[in-house]
Image: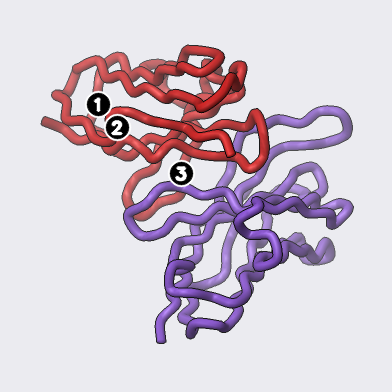
Chain colours: A red, B purple
């Protein structure tokens, strides 16, 4: 299985801050990476696909970058609605695997 | 309305089986692969397998090979996940999710999820 290592596991930031989450793959996965947001008690919601493509309807403050083994997810200006847990997910090979998640809270 | 609606919460004893349904509305299952992902309480996401509703063929994560069965009923636009020989560590929220795949065009992102079904395994 391809291991996905996400950091940090939790993050406290102020409204308006730039927030960055990283995801490292255990092997080269090209750009075969997605990012999801999960709010408490809800199913995950797709934000970024293929490493850097913004899903339709997702605010422009969210972005993704990277390729190979190192990826970054960024929120350019943290908003109250962004409080959630964020997961990366690789689809280079089966079984699909996810990062362990980053819980984001307001400072 | 485009949505995936899952069956309700289940409480099962160790060793039993559980079958969770996922009904698609507003779209045709045959243009998607349907996947199952689970999440233990306070934990991360774990991919279990997928089914091609058109052909009925399924692929499973090695961890779940032999204990999970994915099936579908095209007449009612529904897929099912059956997990057998339940253990306490199977207690989790189980999600179905879709990935578009039609003809030669397949995407690779889960763009729609069910609301989740809680399965509690307890003696």
Q: Can residue A18 be seen in this view?
A: yes
**Given this view, does label 1 or label 3 mark the residue nearer the observer?**
3
Image check: A54 left or right of B25? left
Up the image or down, A67 lies above or below A50; here it is: above
Residue for point 46% across, 26% down:
A58
Chain of residue at mark 3: A
Q: Quadrant of residue B33?
A: top right
Q: Mark 3 points at which residue?
A: A44
Residue closer to the observer: A98 or A28:
A28
Residue for point 57% across, 64% down:
B6
x and y percent of residue B4 in the render?
A: 61, 55
Residues at marks 2 and 1 touching, judged by CB atoms closer than 8 Å = yes
Q: Name the residue under label 2.
A: A82
Query: Dividing the image into 4 quarters, which one contains the C terminus of chain B?
Result: bottom left
Q: Mark 1 points at which residue?
A: A79
Up the image or down, A91 lies above or below A62; here it is: below
Q: Are marks 1 and 3 on the same chain?
A: yes
Query: Within 10 Å of the Cα at label 1, are there few (<14), some (14-19), or many (20+) other Cα atoms?
Result: some
């Amino acid at each position: 299985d391809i291991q996905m290592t996400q950091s940090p596991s939790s993050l406290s930031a102020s409204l308006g801050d730039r927030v960055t989450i990283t995801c490292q793959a255990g092997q080269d996965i090209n750009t075969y990476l997605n990012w999801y947001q999960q709010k408490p008690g809800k199913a995950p919601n797709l934000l970024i696909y293929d490493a850097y493509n913004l899903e339709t309807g997702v605010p422009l403050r969210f972005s993704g970058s990277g390729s190979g083994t190192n990826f970054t997810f960024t929120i350019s200006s943290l908003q109250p609605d962004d409080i959630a847990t964020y997961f990366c997910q690789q689809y280079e090979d089966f079984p699909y695997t996810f990062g362990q998640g980053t819980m984001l809270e307001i400072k | 309305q485009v949505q995936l609606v899952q069956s309700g919460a289940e409480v099962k004893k160790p060793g039993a089986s559980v079958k969770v349904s996922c009904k698609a509305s507003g779209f045709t299952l045959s243009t998607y692969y349907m996947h199952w992902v689970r999440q233990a309480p306070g934990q991360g996401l774990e991919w279990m397998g997928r089914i091609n509703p058109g052909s009925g063929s399924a692929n499973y994560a090695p961890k779940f090979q032999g204990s999970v069965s994915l099936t579908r009923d095209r007449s009612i636009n529904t897929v099912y996940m059956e997990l057998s020989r339940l253990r306490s560590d199977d207690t989790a929220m189980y999600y179905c999710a879709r990935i578009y795949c039609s003809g030669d065009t397949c995407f690779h992102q889960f763009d729609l999820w069910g609301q989740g079904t809680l399965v509690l395994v307890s003696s």
